[in-house]
Amino acid sequence: MIKISKHVRTSINCALFLLLLFVSFSVIGKPPKSAFKFKTIVVDAGHGGKDPGARGTYSFEKNVALAIAKRVHELINDEMPGINVIMTRNTDKFIPLKRRSEIANENNANLFVSIHCNSTPERRSHTKGVLLLVYGFHRKGEQMEALRENASIYIEKDYQKNYDGYSEKDPTALIVLNAFMQKYRKQSILFGELLNKQFVKNDGRSSRGVKEQGVLVLAHSAMPAVLVETGYINNPAEERYLNSKSGQDEIARSIVRAIKIYREDIDSN
Ligand SMILES: [Zn+2]
């Protein structure tokens, strides 16, 4: 038996006490709030330049998306000090889809919000309401939005090289893209649902809810990412709303409110 001096015994007791304390904290404690810093948001105005996006009677999706994105930027600067907003475009400029997610990835963004307008194949329609898209597997027949939003890649010169032959029919491509996003899927859905609630409860908008679809601009973003279809530009009433200052402001305010709630949710978990 080893003889332990009183001094050493006290040290051992101290160490045991600290160990116990550490174990208790590990079991019941949560990581400190500062462990996750929500600080960068990428706001992506869909389409731009030679890619006008969907068309209404008198307006293009690219211009509506940019106006709302700029308003979101202003509101975050005013109301969320310390949050850094990065815009994928500030002007009527064509940005390839892949470049948009690269911008988000390079800046270690915590959230990617892509702003768009919806439309139906008819020239005019009474279909209305918001729709929130997150990246995921999609069933046949639910691909319309994904196909339309992905159509930009065909405008890009090197799309075959850029997207490694991405094809709706290629299961490997889909599996790889989906695995990349799986980690952020839950948080994307959470943000989508929070935003949907703002649109419906606060603004009284109709909604088609949160859907998972194979949208490329979301697939390549290594962070929670949501594509916001802010309304149907080929519905005359919604086209007026989407082009009005008050409509754009209302949409932007809902996005910013949802971001604030989302940040609190993420920070406290
Ligand atoms: Zn779009």
Image (cartoon, grey):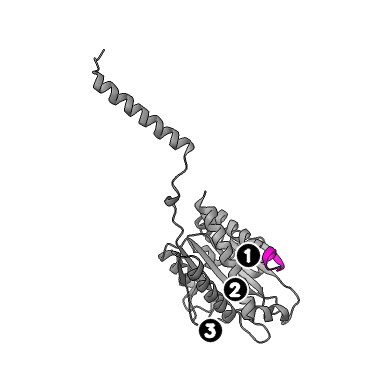
Between circles 3 and 1, the one closer to the viewer is: 1
Give residue 90's position: percent from left, percent from top: 48, 79
For badge 3, the amino acid type reads Lys
Tell me the quarter of the picture where residue 135 sits.
bottom right
Q: Is residue 148 visible?
A: no
Real-space Cα separation, disc 2 to disc 1, in angstroms: 10 Å
For badge 1, the amino acid type reads Leu
Q: Are marks 3 and 1 in contact (CB under 8 Å)?
A: no
Does residue 58 show up magenta in the picture? no
Q: Are marks 2 and 1 in contact (CB under 8 Å)?
A: no
In the image, taking residue 131 as reference, residue 111 lies left or right, namely: left
Q: Secondary structure at mark 2?
A: strand
**First in residue order: circle 2 vs circle 1:** 2
> Which residue has dot 1 on it?
132
Q: Which image quarter is the N terminus in?
A: top left
Report the magenta residues as a range. Answer: 200-208
Q: Is residue 195 above or below residue 10?
A: below
Does residue 203 show up magenta in the picture? yes
Between circles 3 and 2, the one closer to the viewer is: 2
Give residue 199's position: percent from left, percent from top: 66, 66
Q: Secondary structure at mark 1?
A: strand
| Residue at 56% across, 79% down | 67
> Which residue has dot 3 on it?
50
Real-space Cα separation, disc 3 to disc 1, in angstroms: 25 Å
**First in residue order: circle 3 vs circle 2:** 3
| Residue at 58% across, 67% down | 255
